[in-house]
Amino acid sequence: MQRDTLVFNLIKQELERQRRGIELIASENFTSLQVIEAMGTVLTNKYAEGYPGRRYYGGCEIVDQTEQLAIDRLKQVFNIEYANVQPHSGAQANAAVLLAILQPGDAILGLDLSMGGHLTHGSPVNFSGKLYQAHSYGVKKETGLIDYEMLEDKARKVKPKLIICGASAYSRDIDYARIRLVADEVGAFVMADIAHPAGLIAKNLLSSPFQHCHFVTSTTHKTLRGPRGGIIMIGKDFENPFGLKDVKGNTRMMSNLLDMAVFPGTQGGPLEHVIAAKAIAFGEILTDEFTTYAQQVQKNAQSMATAFVSRGYQIISAGTDNHLMLIDLRNKNISGKKAEQVLGHADITANKNMVPFDDKSAFVTSGIRFGVPAITTRGMKEHDMEFVVNAIDTVLMNADDTSVLMKVKQQVNEFMTQFPLYPELG
Ligand code: DSN
């Protein structure tokens, strides 16, 4: 077979794009080269429906070991009793939990997407809002902080079977204990989706959800810096408290119900090449080097927030505890859509985002979201945030001046040469 130079040339171009730009998408990161290597291996050839030691295919003795390693290391990372490493994504992980514990039409309660939540937390355009009776809570207009009173009031009113906490555009820590209190009062499960801050939680830089939430889901490619994928975890495996039954009518441990909800419930064959890469990433997270990385992420985010505030930018909730910040651009007279576009011209990548109580549509938005996991992996420290924020401010304040945008792009490209990315790839 001839080498497909068309595709490989495009991959090379993407590597160059990643190298020369400032990557500020809060949900992105740069994995280690060994994580990438594992994904490009023969493990992609293997069918392994089932779980280690109990598969529906022969020849699984090697992938049993890589998958078991991933499970064991993930349990060690968070000091937990149960982990399923098969979900193909965070959305798949959430779908499996909902399938395991809910019946179609059951009520759920999650943070509104327009207030920082996620599609799978009950958005009407997602399965979670179509199959279940979805209700939402929000943040307070004055503070940008989660409105826990609203969450409690709604929970008492709609009596959800599941309360979902966690967010994709919320820069503060979450009071899991408070959410569990009202969940117990109304007889609901609690699921924390920690896809965004998981790497900081792993290193105890944010509150842990495990002792308060029945289920914890995450992606593996954001602050955990692994391959693209999802995971489901339980802090302490327990007999299922509400007596949920499997399809045969048997009451099972929650871990059994979750395993069945992933496979055969929502997925077929697991991606064993990605699971091997997850095992490698979890091994990396267990090192002191990753502790330093996670601490630096938090320091960089705080330093970036300070630099934005000093230039008159309005950060929702007035700061950050984690790796990201959401900025309301209304006082800067530029939409999120335009900001994303012009920053792109200067090789700065970010995404437009609705802000709470936004008067613009999701396609235009009043806000933009910035995150530091990727630039921290590149090696940036607190003092580098001045350059980054200055470049962003110059672009946004001169959005219609192409010569300024081109000048900033040149400065950005030069600045990024200090932070080599995958030098081994040539
Ligand atoms: N798409 C992810 C993010 O950017 O936050 C959430 O799934």
Image (cartoon, rainbow, N blue to C red):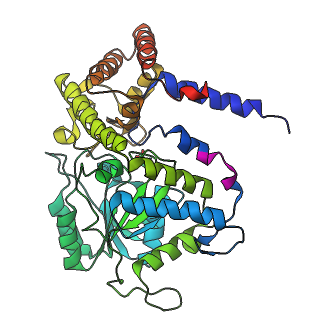
Q: Quadrant of residue 16?
A: top right
Give the camera-side residue of 117 and 385: 385
What predominant SS class does the magenta segment belong to? helix
Where's residue 2, x and y in %?
Answer: 84, 35
Q: Please count the marks in the image.
A: 0
Taking 10 as reference, is 1 left or right?
right
- Which residue is at a point 33% across and 72% down the rendered structure image? 162
* Residue at (44% x, 44% y) in the render: 225
User: Which percent across, then down, holds residue 134?
Assistant: 36, 67
Membership of 40 in magenta stretch: yes
| Quarter of the rendering containing residue 29 | top left
Q: Position of residue 198 (x, y in %)?
A: 35, 52
Closer-to-camera residue (170/14)? 14
Q: Quadrant of the C terminus?
A: top right
Residue 256 against residue 72 in the figure, above or below: below
Residue 218: which quarter of the image?
A: bottom left
Which residues are drawn in magenta?
A: 38-43
- Let me know if residue 382 appears in the view: yes
In this rendering, does residue 313 appear at all?
Answer: no
Residue farthest right in this picture = 1
- Residue 200 part of the magenta segment: no
Instruction: Point out the residue furthest to the bottom here.
Output: 249
Q: Is 40 situated left or right of 122 in this image? A: right
Image quarter of the N terminus: top right
| Picture layout, residue 106 above or below residue 229 | below
In this rendering, position of residue 245 left or right of residue 189: right
Q: Residue at x 77, y 34 (%)?
A: 4
Residue 91 appears at what percent x and percent y?
Answer: 47, 58
